[in-house]
Image (spheres, rainbow, N blue to C red):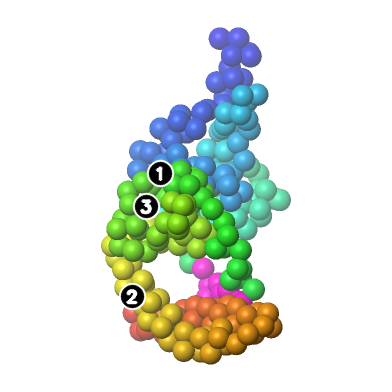
Amino acid sequence: MTRAGAAARAYMSIGEVLAQLRPEFPDTTISKLRFLESVGLVEPERTAAGYRKYSREDVARLRYVLTAQRDHYLPLRVIREQLAEIDRGAPGADGATIAQPRALVAADELELPDAGDFAESAADERYSRTELLDRSGATEEQLRQLEQYGLIIKRPGSFFDGDALAIVSTVVQMAAFGLEPRHLRAYRSAAEREVGLFEQVITPMARQRGPEAKARAAETVRELAALSVRLHAALVAAGLRASLGG
């Protein structure tokens, strides 16, 4: 084989990468590989025609990410930070010298959302079914189940919005713990109860006239959403502390 031919074979297509990773990570899909690229965890080169070409280093990074998710339950934010540290000082992402991820994420590292994270623009975003799968890394079966159990719904016009993308992306990460959409139906029921509770606060504001009243109601929605997430996280942590021996 010529040197040029050997150099060409040093790169792999996304299908070849999937074939390499599947024996060790059977849940990996092309959609998930595209998702990991979209969030900046791996950056394969592109051919002139736009096809991805992965190097051995790219595959090592993917293996690192998938191992960190499967064995250590690390969120993508933490994995991204670790890869950045490796890029700054580790001898190379070759699978042997790459640093091992930390076993657990400390509680004080978790970034809970504030009101500013609940943007109104989420309802204006539009994704087709294919775009939702690509952006979230979900499988077709996961998406089907999420629709079946009412965790996401299509908007008029048969598209999904930014809220649907957030839900699906979160479920994909929870799947690393063995949780499936059917296990999460209680979240939908709990959310509906919270909506009913918060509507008692919001409705009087929404009935008032004027843009200021509408803006105040929208801000209240965002603040209540953030507080709800924080309360839920605190209650779950308190409930599980006994199981962790704390």
Q: Tell me residue 54's x, y (percent).
A: 56, 32
Q: Residue furthest toward the front?
A: 209
User: In front of the other: label 1 or label 2?
Assistant: 2
Q: Is residue 16 left or right of residue 27?
A: right
Taking depth in this image into account, of 164 and 158 the one nearest to the observer is 158
Q: Tell me residue 200's x, y (percent).
A: 46, 89
Q: Which badge, 1 or 2, comes first in the chain's sequence?
A: 1
Q: Which badge, 1 or 3, comes first in the chain's sequence?
A: 1
Q: Amino acid at mark 1?
A: Thr
Q: Secondary structure under badge 3?
A: helix
The residue beneath circle 3 is 143
**Residue 124, relative to residue 215: is it above or below?**
above
Q: Amino acid at mark 3?
A: Leu
* Stretch in magenta: 105-115
**Label 3–label 2 contact, CB within 8 A:** no
The residue beneath circle 1 is 28
Q: Residue at x 58, y 51 (%)?
A: 39
Q: Amino acid at mark 2?
A: Ser
Q: Tell me residue 214's x, y (percent).
A: 63, 80
Q: CA distance from mark 1 to mark 3?
A: 15 Å
Q: In terms of image quadrants, where is residue 167?
A: bottom left
108 magenta-colored = yes
Question: Is residue 8 something that shows in the picture?
Answer: yes
The residue beneath circle 2 is 189
Magenta span dominant secondary structure:
loop
Q: Secondary structure under badge 2?
A: helix
